[in-house]
Each structure stands twice: as structure tokens, then as C-alpha cells.
Amino acid sequence: MKKFGVEIAVGIFIIAGLLCLAYISIYLGKINLLGMGNNTYEVKAIFSSATGLKKDTDIKIAGVNVGIVTSITLDNYEAVVAMKIRNDIELQDDCIASINTMGLLGDAYVEISPGGSDVIIEPGGMIRETVPPVDLKKLIGNIAFGKVE
């Protein structure tokens, strides 16, 4: 009888561990399970270069994460970046999306600077104003050879 109680305790411990592992995997992996996490809408932006961006790159406003990059495609030699933005964030139609890095050599992210317009971008809409990332190699080359503008 005592052996049966130990087996039950071990079974409960293993099940609890598996449930914790599943929760952490879903939470950290940003997996959309059974409709959870559908509180976003999509917008797109066209950049002349999307250097450093990749799927799941953060979208920030004033340093606060408000979304992620969902895809990057090429259209007419320009990068079309699709982004999922939280529903509670309204983007004005004159906002500016720029690609920045965290520090000098850090990961890239998209920074959205709010606009002043009363017109809000609809889901599926386009951010019209974009700023591509700074080309660090080109900048250093210009400084080294005295071609700073």
C-alpha cells in the first residue's frame, strides 16, 4: 500500500512538471493557442532596406514593446514589413516607422514615432513614413575617408 502512495506522488509531480514546461513553452514561444493572443491588428510599412530585421523583431513606441514583425517580403526592390500591433495602440496616419538598434551593435527593432493627425491607420493599413537603418559600415567608411556630409 505504501508503494502505491509513492507512485501516485511521483505521477503527480511529473504531470505538474509537464504542465509547467508546456506553459513556459507557450509563453516564451509566443504560441497562439486556442485563440489566445488575438488582440492585435496588422499594419505594413515599406523600407528601402530592412537590414537587421527578422520575424518576431520587437516594435516599440517610446521604448515600450507594442508589437512584433510578422513577415518581411520584397516588392519592387523594397522591403515590405508586416507588423502585428496591440489593439489598444492607435497609430496616426502620419506616424513614422524607423529601424534602430539597441546600442551600437545591438539587435534591430522598429521604433514608431507617433504623429499628430486625428486620422488613425485602419487594420491592414500602411505606415507611409519610414526611415531605413543607418548603414554603420558606410558611415565608418565616410568618417575614415573624410566624406562626412
Image (cartoon, rainbow, N blue to C red):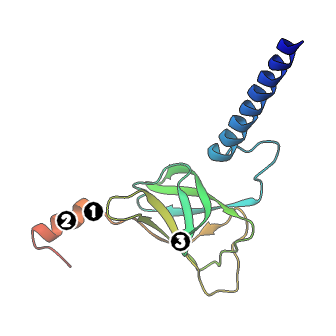
Disc 2 vs disc 3: which is toward the camera? Answer: 3
Q: In which quarter of the image is the C terminus?
A: bottom left
Disc 1 marks which residue?
Answer: 136
- Rendered location of residue 35, percent (x, y): 81, 47
Secondary structure found at label 1? helix
Q: What number is the disc on residue 63?
A: 3
User: How many angstroms separate mark 3 from mark 1 (CA)?
Assistant: 22 Å
Residue drawn where x is 62% and y is 67% of the image:
126
Question: Which image quarter: residue 32?
Answer: top right
* Label 1 crowd (10 A; few <14 / some 14-19 / many >=20): few
Of residue 63 and residue 13, the one placed in the foreground of this image is 13
Label 3 vs 1, first from the N-terminus? 3
State left or right for residue 1 relative to residue 41. right
Question: Which image quarter: residue 132?
Answer: bottom left
Residue drawn where x is 39% and y is 55% of the image:
51
User: How many angstroms separate mark 2 from mark 3 (CA)?
Assistant: 26 Å
Disc 2 marks which residue?
Answer: 140
* Label 3 crowd (10 A; few <14 / some 14-19 / many >=20): few
**What's the residue type where badge 3 is placed?**
Gly
**What's the residue type where badge 2 is placed?**
Ile
**Figure check: 12 above or below 116:** above
**What's the residue type where badge 1 is placed?**
Leu
State left or right for residue 75 relative to residue 122. left
